[in-house]
Amino acid sequence: MPAARAGPGPEPSRLGEIGGAFLRLGLVSFGGPAAHLGYFRNEFVGRRGWLSDADYADAVALCQFLPGPASSQVAFAIGMRRAGFAGGLAASLCFLLPSAALMILFAYGVASLGDVASAGWLHGLRIAAVAVVACAVASMGVLLCPDWARRILACAAAAAVLLLPGAAVQAGTIAACALVGRMILRGKRPPPETAATPKRSPWPAASLAVFLLLLVSLPLLARQTGDKRVAVFDGFYRAGSLVFGGGHVVLPLLRSEVEPNGWIGDGAFLAGYGAAQAMPGPLFSFAGYLGTVIQAGAHAWMGGVLALIAIFLPGWLLVAGAFPYWDLLRSRGWVQAALGGANAAVVGILLAALYRPLFTEGIRDARDAAAAVVGIVLLGKLRVPPWAVVVLSAAAISSIARRRLWPMVGGASNTTTPSSVARNADW
């Protein structure tokens, strides 16, 4: 994979070209990371010819190997090849901008409504989130756990994080599974390819050094200062540093950061996560919603921006640091084997999140379960886009709640009795 463009600085016209292309994609790229990669390939390989299919495949492989939001990191890598580090930032920021702005506005709307815990549309978002994550677990399980060794690792990871919740346990679980994968999966990974010698430059090493320095120093700084903003930046930076396997995996990591500190309740958390499914662009824009809700007040948007920078910064630094060394890294069989174990742990962590908090908070009775099954069928069998399922779920549950139609739908009666109203008060 050719190195990023060198020189004194990118041309402003080239940065504008990159920003405009990715801003347009950020407005229309619905469907999650897999769909985003398809959009990128059509735009930058097929239409614009900025890179070859082989170069694009290398960029995708690198970003799948690293923790962080895969599609946003691919955007960064494409921009970096085109115009250096500044081009990478322009690509990633412009791709993020539409969804981030929408999620911050959604956070203001939720805050203005006050107590929305019993709102029907919010409960619809929770049910839609159950369906979306269930489909993600199924598809990732087939891809990342093709044999019993990795399935057992995934189940062990799920059990570990359910029994001992917390960000430290999740990080330790991924590391332990990577170590086990290195020992047992070396013969099951593809043979190593010929490595290319990376070009010498101080910037990749500097990027990796900054990544590690922040990862180690931010928790210490947060404890010493007691500043909530530093603690929020630390929590979101750590989440962005540990997320393998796509945007859905950020759910358990972020929850383990915000819940113990009492920054946000489960109801508001899951409402934002459900709404993020209906947005174009990267799912990590969910961080903008959380940061805005945590900050509160007239200037809450500043908290959203802070959270967004914190969660995306690790991915940017890692791509900038690993970009020239990717050929060398992927030629190591033990690295690929360790990655296989880490990916199995990711499936297990997401499976645990499907149960808690999604299932425990979103599914209250058999009717909720039926609604979630309908969502799974729409997503998995009928291939309905996730944003459409989210909107449909929120609208349908809100309408049912308002008109008290569940007894009629269930076939028991067309009359709403006081007892049925009490049973469905949360709808």
Image (cartoon, helix red, strand yellow):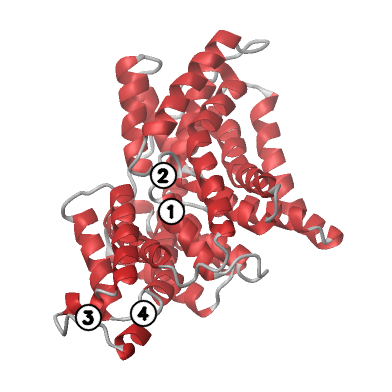
| Residue found at the very far right of the displayed protein | 224
Residue 330 visible (yes or no): no
Q: Is residue 127 left or right of residue 157?
A: left
Label 2: which residue? Answer: 279
Q: Earlier in the sequence, mark 3 or mark 1?
A: 1
Q: Find numbered disc 1 in the image and state the secondary structure of the residue it sits on.
A: helix
Q: CA distance from mark 4 to mark 1?
A: 20 Å
Q: Amino acid at mark 4?
A: Arg
Give above or below for 200 relative to 258. Answer: above
Q: Amino acid at mark 1?
A: Ala
Give the labeled residue for mark 4.
364
State the mark number for residue 146: none
Distance from label 3 to label 4 (Cα)? 16 Å
Which is more N-terminal, label 1 or label 4? 1
> CA gap, disc 3 to disc 1?
28 Å
Mark 3 or mark 1, whichever is nearer to me:
3
Residue holding disc 1 = 275
